[in-house]
Amino acid sequence: MISDREIIKKPGAVRARRLRVGVAGLGVVGGGAALELIGEAGRYDLCAVLVRDREKARAPELDAVRKYTDVGVFLSEGLDVIIDALPCGDVGRVLIECALTQGVSVVSANKQAVFGSLVRFCKLAADNKAAFYYSAAVGGGAPMVETVGQARSAGEVKSLTAIVNGAVNYILTLTGSGVSFDDAVKRAQMAGFAEPDPEADLSGDDARAKASILAFEAFGVEIAAEAIAVEALDAARAEHIVRDGRSWRQLTRIEKLDGGKVVARISYECIDGDAFFRAVRDEGNALRVVNAAGAEFTCAGKGAGRAPTVRSLFADLEEIRAASAGYLQENSLKSAPPLS
């Protein structure tokens, strides 16, 4: 409940209390989000974290934070919002469903958890008066979900083309400069752009999940995983691209056909004639949306790594915080309902 309110000097003005936040997962992204929350103690209260191993050594700033391994106990902390930075889609889906069912808002960077469940989660959020944000699940520092929303508000979306996997783009940049494929993968892992097991990046599963999320944002439909054709990246494919000598990128293409069907594919394409995508190097991501009138909407930014993903999480978190503060401003003389 919003009960701890502070009336400031100007009559009728209300400042919302700090949001009570829990972080699920303390890996590269979740650990960064937790430390950021501690640094923003005037606005957020980091109440608890959900981890696999409570005894694992972590940043000393997190020593005093309560750590749980059970989803139910974690959610019993009276949280307003959870940040889902779990690496596992299955656990993430359970967590998100439980949170939204209890009216706890969710900000997720877990694309494997939201992929295929967006319709259900959005309905759960609406039914239980909770917020559900997932911008950080696709694009990293490139505001892809927001850009698709802007394009959709300007007219019917016709197609999207995007670079959605920062690790793969980083690997292609390195191999193009003479680094071997195996070394390029290791460097991507050391930089925090690829997971210790890079299979999801190299197989295209990561890009497939993000393509489905973008399709939902643009067209309101979720494309089944098996319906998205994906080209994998391995040493032989990387070597072929290097020998070709031109500029190649992993491109995700999504379009609405004349009959209304939405289709997607992910493949490696030469982009020498496309200055926008050719300029995207290293861990960069980029998106171009075209609507039915031919208008283009674009965005670009760093698509992998702790810092850009944490920034995206906090942009969503601020939306929730601003909404709660706005409600209090409007209802300063009324008893407040649950934040979520």
Image (spheres, rainbow, N blue to C red):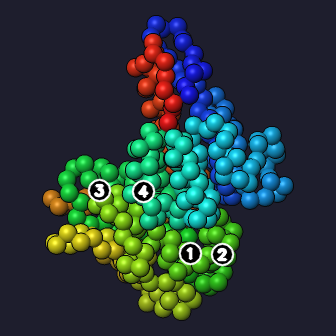
Amino acid type, callout 2 = Asp
Work out whether residue 169 or residue 121 is closer to the camera in this orientation and state it. Answer: 121
Distance (Cα) linking label 3 and label 1: 28 Å
Which mark, by number, is residue 269?
A: none
Residue 68 image position (x, y, % from top left) = 74, 49
C-beta proximity under 8 Å, tags 3 and 1:
no
The residue mark sitting in front, 4 or 2, is 4
Q: Residues within 10 Å of mark 1 (few under 14, many from 20)?
A: some
Residue topped by disc 3: 297
The residue mark sitting in front, 2 or 3, is 2
Distance (Cα) linking label 1 and label 4: 24 Å
Amino acid type, callout 1 = Ala
- Horizontal side of 147 relative to 201 (left or right) equals left
C-beta proximity under 8 Å, tags 4 and 3:
no
Mark 1 or mark 4, which has the lower sequence index? 4
Mark 3 or mark 1, which has the lower sequence index? 1
Looking at the image, is 35 positioned above or below residue 93? Answer: above
Which mark, by number, is residue 120?
A: 4
Q: Residue at x 39, y 54 (%)?
A: 145
C-beta proximity under 8 Å, tags 2 and 3:
no
